[in-house]
Amino acid sequence: MPEPVLAPQADVDAEMAAITGAYEQAGVVETQPRRDYAPYRSSLLRHPTKSLHHADPETIELWAPCFGPTDVDPLEADLTVQHTGEPIGERMVVTGRVTDGEGRPVRHQLVEIWQANAGGRYVHKRDQHPAAVDPNFTGVGRCLTDGDGWYRFTTIKPGPYPWKNHRNAWRPAHIHFSMFGTEFTQRVVTQMYFPGDPLFALDPIFRSIVDPAARARLVASYDHDVTTHEWATGYRWDIVLTGSNRTLTETDTEDGDH
Amino acid sequence: MTTPSAPLAPTPGQTVGPFFHYALPYPGDRDLVPQGSPGSVRLHGTVHDGAGAPVPDALVEIWQAGPDGRVVQEHGSLRRDGFTFTGFGRASTTRAGHYDFSTLLPGPTDPGAAPFFAVTVFARGLLHRLFTRAYLPADAPGASAEALAADRLLASVEESRRTTLVATTDAPTPASAASGVLGLRFDIHLQGGSETVFLAYPGH
Ligand SMILES: [Fe+3]
């Protein structure tokens, strides 16, 4: 099969700039990515064209699946100790608090992460990027938030990587995050980025969130209080889930014994 | 107690991307109950894109009540013990875009309510997760045409699109007759003429 001809970055930049211009003109604040965002080519046939249908959550939708110590080993929160040797790259801690839209902590809930290694390579059979696989790094972690909504992972800072969206397309370095809330409607999968990445302006996945303030919510901040002496750099990233609709009981709001 | 105040702006979503397969799937993820166990059902279907092509890199999650209609709050979805029903399952699609769950029929959560599976869809190319419902068809045990007709959400959807929210019963096969496992089919169309009705909840 002949290689498809990929659009240059300049074409994609122009498309993104036009969308940004129209957004600024419209003057209505958006907080989520556009599912219909043509500069991200894979979205073309995979976004609904009809508007979402309003639903009032009912019973099952007002609750979330429940995870506990039987589900997650505390060691799964340290991605640097999953093999016999030390992974290569910048050891870092990422921590933050998960709350709902009212600022209430999301307690004892599952957080899952996955990421590329320091060279920008995933341990995935479909990753074609010719960068080294690190035998000491898989890049998968899980933890449960604590009684105050905090999560904490020790990992290696991921590298940026190329992809085939357009010619010379590179993803800014990121960690994929998957979160559950206190109810089904809060389920979200997203990506955490690092401050000051020069690839931000060029990346159609990041820029599918057309509002700059909303985009900034995906960028962690360097935190010297998280950084530890002679061991790891530290990043802080807080997560706010969409507001919950259920009237929370005491078990949800107090740090119970479970 | 915290006093409710103005909602905080939510953290935006992003696509699950192409490389989730070594991270999110786990052993037993799609088997809420062991496959073929007495009283189990197979909930399955194909995820399609706007051209009708199967989506081989989608992830479907279900969250459901137990057969008695109660919301389950049991640990153990990630480490199934073969006995505890947790109500949560996760299935990545095959190269043919197909997903498959082994589970139990959800019961009505209120007397007379139409039972359904709550469904979340993720995929490469899909920038933000989608929610929908897979209702039990009228001929499934515990379901009825009356309950479906009385359902508030279904009634609020234009009639021509209502069927996208209701699973269909598989025709029996020698294998399904022997095992007694009921098959329920729920295809998901991300875009196009038969586009699935996707849901926005308050606060989205
Ligand atoms: Fe990635």
Image (cartoon, grey):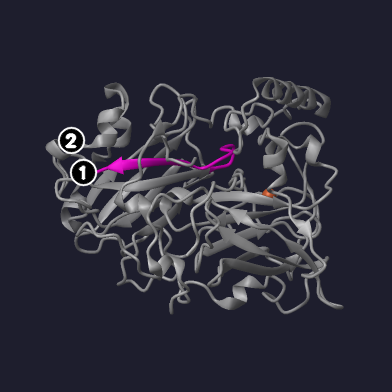
Disc 2 sits on a residue from what chain? B
Residue A198 horizontal side relative to residue A64, left or right: right
Q: Residue at x 37, y 64 (%)?
A: A249
Q: Is residue A186 visible?
A: yes
Q: Nearer the viewer, residue B160 or B34?
A: B160
Share a chain, discs 1 and 2? yes
Marks 1, 2: nearer the viewer = 2
Residue A168 falls in which quadrant of the image? Answer: top right
Residue A144 visible somewhere in the drawing:
no
Q: Is residue B17 left or right of residue A13?
A: left
Could you tell me the amino acid type at mark 1? Ala
The magenta stretch spans residue B203: no
Q: Secondary structure at mark 2?
A: helix
What span is colored magenta in the figure? B123-136
**In the image, residue A130 lies at what x, y percent?**
80, 51
Which one is earlier in the sequence, the residue at label 1 or at label 2? Answer: 1
Q: Nearer the viewer, residue B181 or B72?
A: B72
The residue under label 1 is B114
Left or right, residue A231 beside residue A237: right
**At which x and y percent is residue B193?**
41, 21
Q: Is residue B58 above or below residue B74?
A: above
Q: How far across and down, in percent of the image, does residue B109 sit?
A: 23, 52
The reply to whether the C-beta atoms of the residues labelled 1 and 2 are less than 8 Å apart is yes
The residue labelled by disc 2 is B150
Does the magenta segment cover residue B132? Answer: yes
- Chain ID for label 1? B
Q: Residue A150 location, x and y as percent?
A: 60, 67
* Marks 1 and 2, how far apart at CA: 8 Å
Q: Nearer the viewer, residue B96 or B21?
A: B21
* Three-letter amino acid code at the position of disc 2: Ala
